[in-house]
Image: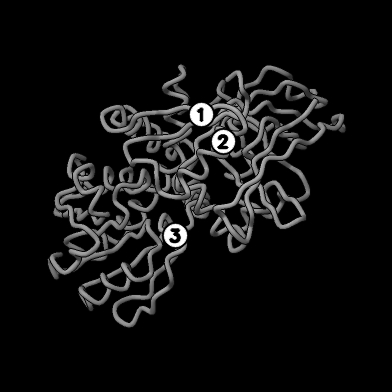
């Protein structure tokens, strides 16, 4: 049996190729997953851009200058040599952009863990696949599964970023400025930040996305990237989903010492040149898996689950007012979708779900 795989050029992330590999017989303790479908968003582009720095290329390693970007989605065990993980189980997790994945797996409370030698260094959340039978966030149905693939991981990043700020009362800020405010992570963050008393949420986005962002409930003010000077000069924090050095520098320069904290989360503006930050706080990278581990220890598993479940289900339900799901099938459909997302051709009101299977 063949496995079609979409690979990305590690030196030029806009370039992809499709390869077919023969599936080898399973070794002891392995499972074979049929990857049903996965979300393909700007977040996956960030995985490629930060692949060397944060180890994303090592999830599903290759050795010839091409890489396999992880994607969040759904898969089913179709073959197993692990007696604890029988055929038929359905899982949510990070998978390669492929038709199948073969992993050395260990059964854990919530599902399975990838225990391949190359995965030992990775954060636990990236190695875990959640069995739908034990998934507190699971909602059955095609539309719900698609929305969870698109939104679950991104919302949890936004949720945890809000909790990080809230630990320090948003550093005394009167407003939070959100760069790339049309992104799904930004919208999830803004939904949570909007529950904080006395905090204004300022959306910064492209001119073409201003109308879309203005229609979203959490944002109190919407400005384009060339209108940063119109933002009030009051105590502020910045959360940057764009990774655009010149835009971030412009916010720092405009707010000066009124900027109390500068957080970098995403890189939706891939390819933008860096810019020196000469005023305000040094931007700090926010790494969600570390926060998942920290909050799990601090709150305990039960409390973490209770806090995140209600918020996530609410966000997924609310997304039906602003997010349309579009599916793409087959290897060529996956390749075309990567190109469209990479080139910024997918509207923020659209979420792309991909299956490399032609019969999905």
Quadrant, the N terminus? top right
Q: Is 65 situated left or right of 360 in this image?
A: right
Q: Which mark is residue 241?
A: none
Task: Mark 2 vs mark 3: give the one in front.
Answer: 2
Badge 2 vs badge 3, beta-carbon distance below 8 Å: no
Badge 1 vs badge 2, beta-carbon distance below 8 Å: yes
Q: In the image, what residue occupies the spot 78% across and 49% down?
A: 117
Residue 218 versus residue 316 in the image, above or below: below
Comes first in the chain, label 3 or label 1: 3
Residue 300 versus residue 223 in the image, above or below: above
Comes first in the chain, label 2 or label 3: 3
Counting other residues with Cα less than 10 Å from the Cα at mark 3, is it few (<14), some (14-19), or many (20 or more)? Answer: some
Q: Picture coordinates of residue 32 (x, y %)?
A: 75, 28
Q: Is 115 situated left or right of 162 in this image?
A: right
Q: Picture coordinates of residue 30 (x, y %)?
A: 80, 32
Foreground: 277 or 68?
A: 68
Number of residue marks: 3
Counting other residues with Cα less than 10 Å from the Cα at mark 2, is it few (<14), some (14-19), or many (20 or more)? Answer: many
Chosen colour scheme:
one colour
Q: Which mark is residue 328?
A: 1
Q: CA distance from mark 2 to mark 3?
A: 29 Å
Judging by the rendered image, the residue that carries numbered circle 2 is: 334
Secondary structure category for the residue under label 2: helix
Residue 1 versus residue 13 in the image, above or below: above
Comes first in the chain, label 1 or label 2: 1
Task: Mark 3 vs mark 1: give the one in front.
Answer: 1
Q: Picture coordinates of residue 84 (x, y %)?
A: 75, 24
Q: CA distance from mark 1 to mark 2?
A: 7 Å
Q: In the image, what residue occupies the spot 26% across and 54% down?
A: 205
Q: In the image, what residue occupies the spot 45% across and 47% down?
A: 42
């Amino acid at each position: 049996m063949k496995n079609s795989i979409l690979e990305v050029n590690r030196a030029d992330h806009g370039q992809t190729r499709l390869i077919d590999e023969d599936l080898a017989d399973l070794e002891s303790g392995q499972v074979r997953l049929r990857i049903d479908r996965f979300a393909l968003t700007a977040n996956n582009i960030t995985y490629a851009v930060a692949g060397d720095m944060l180890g994303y290329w090592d999830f599903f390693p290759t050795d010839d200058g091409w890489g396999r970007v992880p994607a969040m989605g759904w898969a089913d065990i179709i073959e197993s040599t692990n007696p604890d993980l029988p055929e038929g189980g359905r899982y949510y997790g990070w998978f390669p952009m492929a038709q199948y994945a073969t992993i050395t797996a260990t059964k854990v409370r919530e599902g399975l863990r990838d225990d391949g030698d190359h995965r030992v260094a990775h954060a636990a959340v990236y190695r875990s696949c959640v069995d739908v039978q034990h998934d507190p966030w699971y909602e059955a149905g095609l539309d719900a599964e698609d929305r969870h693939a698109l939104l679950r991981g991104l919302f949890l990043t936004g949720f945890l970023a809000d909790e990080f700020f809230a630990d320090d009362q948003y550093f005394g800020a009167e407003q939070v400025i959100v760069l790339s405010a049309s992104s799904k992570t930004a919208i999830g963050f803004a939904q949570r930040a909007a529950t904080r008393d006395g905090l204004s949420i300022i959306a910064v986005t492209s001119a073409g996305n201003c109308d879309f962002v203005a229609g979203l409930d959490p944002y109190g003010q919407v400005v384009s990237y060339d209108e940063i000077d119109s933002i009030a000069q009051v105590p502020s924090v910045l959360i940057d989903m764009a990774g655009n050095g010149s835009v971030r520098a412009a916010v720092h320069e405009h707010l000066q010492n009124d900027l109390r904290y500068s957080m970098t989360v995403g890189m939706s503006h891939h390819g933008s040149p860096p810019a020196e930050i000469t005023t305000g706080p040094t931007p700090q990278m926010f790494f969600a898996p570390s926060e998942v581990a920290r909050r799990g220890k601090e709150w305990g598993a039960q409390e973490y689950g209770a806090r995140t479940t209600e918020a996530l289900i609410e966000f997924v339900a609310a997304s039906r007012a602003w997010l349309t799901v579009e599916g793409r099938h087959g290897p060529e459909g996956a390749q075309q979708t990567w190109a469209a997302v990479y080139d910024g051709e997918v509207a923020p009101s659209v979420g792309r779900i991909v299956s490399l299977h032609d019969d999905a």
